[in-house]
Image (cartoon, helix red, strand yellow):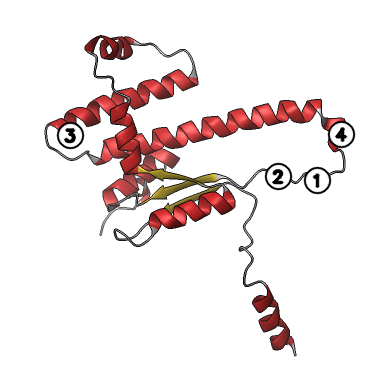
Amino acid sequence: AKIANIVHSTLKRENSFPVVPKLPLTICLLGKPYVGKKTQAEKLLERYGVLPISLRKLIEDAVAAVPSDEAKRTELEKMKPSSPAEEEAKVVFDLGMKIKQTLESGEAVNDETSVDLVLAAINRLKRKVDEEKKAAGEEAKEGEEELQGISTSKERKIGGWCLIGFPETQAQASMFEKKLSGFDIEDQKGPSK
């Protein structure tokens, strides 16, 4: 009878989404080309608010951030950021310049530049989430009396980020892990025998 209850309870939940903790998710979707990584990332965005990060799109955006006008480019190169948003824009501009020069010379974008670009996107998302939380906290303080004991239907989605097809190589993965967490597996290995 217990087995029948378990089977029947799982059949009833067939159309519901899996239970996911209400913490931001960090996901890497890996696989061969055209296996549905982007499709799954779109579903994660729709269902859980997990924002997709595609290296290809980041590269296109970074190159597009570099103005074709030489005067504007020189002005941006000399810019001294005064806010986190300006600092992020400066990082993306500098990476865009490096990527544009690399692509114009016919070479592939190196792993370090790719990792730096992805980390800049993650940092931008973190800053935006922090700003949203700060704004939501201020709004919550203003309307706190109205919301006591009432659960709103506009609960914030889970959020987080999802890398699409990145990292592609072991070198990118270890470099990404080291820069993201500060942890280097090579430092933890003992002496070789």
Local secondary structure at mark 3: helix
Which badge, 2 or 4, is on the more N-terminal residue? 4
- Asked if labels 1 and 3 touch by Cβ distance under 8 angstroms, the answer is no
Task: Pinpoint residue 19: horizontal percent, then vertical percent.
Answer: 64, 61
Which badge, 4 or 1, is on the more N-terminal residue? 4
Local secondary structure at mark 1: loop
Local secondary structure at mark 4: helix
Numbered badge on residue 151: 1
Amino acid under disc 4: Glu
Separation (CA) of disc 2 from disc 1: 8 Å
- Tell me the residue at 40%/32% (across/down): 120
Which badge, 2 or 3, is on the more N-terminal residue? 3
Amino acid under disc 1: Ser
Local secondary structure at mark 2: loop
Numbered badge on residue 155: 2
Q: Residues within 10 Å of mark 1 (few under 14, many from 20)?
A: few
Q: Nearer the viewer, residue 135 or 24?
A: 135
Residue holding disc 4: 146
Q: Residues within 10 Å of mark 4 (few under 14, many from 20)?
A: few
Separation (CA) of disc 2 from disc 3: 44 Å
